[in-house]
Amino acid sequence: MEITAWLFDLYPVQSRIVLWFVTAAGQRLRVTDSFTYRIYVHGPQAKLRSLAAHLKSRAPASRWIKRTYMDQGMELWQGQRLDVLCLEIRAYGDLAPLLAYLGTWDAELALYNCDLSIPVYYLYEKKLFPCSWYRLEATGDQLDRLTPLEHPFQ
C-alpha cells in the first residue's frame, strides 16, 4: 500500500518503533519499523576489546547486546574521528540496565548516544521530522519506505 499522510506520533515497543500517521481525509494509520539502538564507547583499545569480550560472554550483559563491533564516530565538539566500540541493543528495555552496568566500568571509557530518547534517535538516524507529510509504503503494518514530502526548514 502507498499512501500520503502526516506523521503525528511515534514511540518504542520492545525493539520496534510504532509510527502513527493521519491522512488528509482523517484516516489514522499505525505502522511499525525496525530500529536498532546503538551506544558507542570510546577509550583505550585494550579496554574496548576487554569490554566487548565481557559483554559477549557474561550474563546478564550478554542478553542485552545483539552485536558488538569496532567503528568510527565523530566527536561532536572537536569534530575529530574516534575509534569506538558499537553496542547494538537487543531490546529497548535493555537500555537502562546496560547503562547502569556500563557505569561500573573504567572511568576511561566514554559513552556516546546513551542519553538520546529512542524516538528522537530514530528520527535523527532516519532524517525524519514529526508533524510533516510523507509518502509511505507499507506491507500490512510493516513500514517499507518513508519519503518526506516537505522540508521543515523551508
Image (tube, helix red, strand yellow):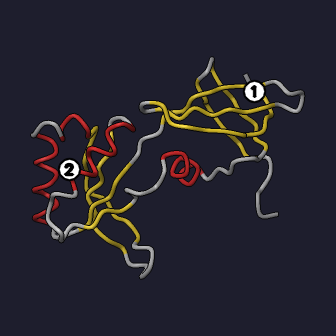
Name the residue tied to disc 1. 2
Residue 132, above or below 24: below
Q: Nearer the viewer, residue 96 or 19?
A: 96
Distance (Cα) linking label 2 and label 1:
43 Å
Which of the 4 quarters of the picture holds residue 44? bottom left
Q: Which residue is mark 2?
A: 101
Q: Nearer the viewer, mark 2 or mark 1?
A: 2
Q: Considering the numbered disc 1 on the image, is that residue within a helix, a strand or a loop? A: strand
Residue at the extreme right of the image, as rendered: 25
Q: Nearer the viewer, residue 147 or 107?
A: 107
Point out the tag, 2 or 1, that comes first from the N-terminus. 1
- Write the residue at 27% across / 42% down: 67
For the N terminus, which image quadrant?
Answer: top right
User: Measuring 56% from the left and 37% from the top, which residue is drawn there?
Assistant: 11
Residue 55 x %, y %? 16, 45
Percent position (x, y) of residue 107?
18, 69
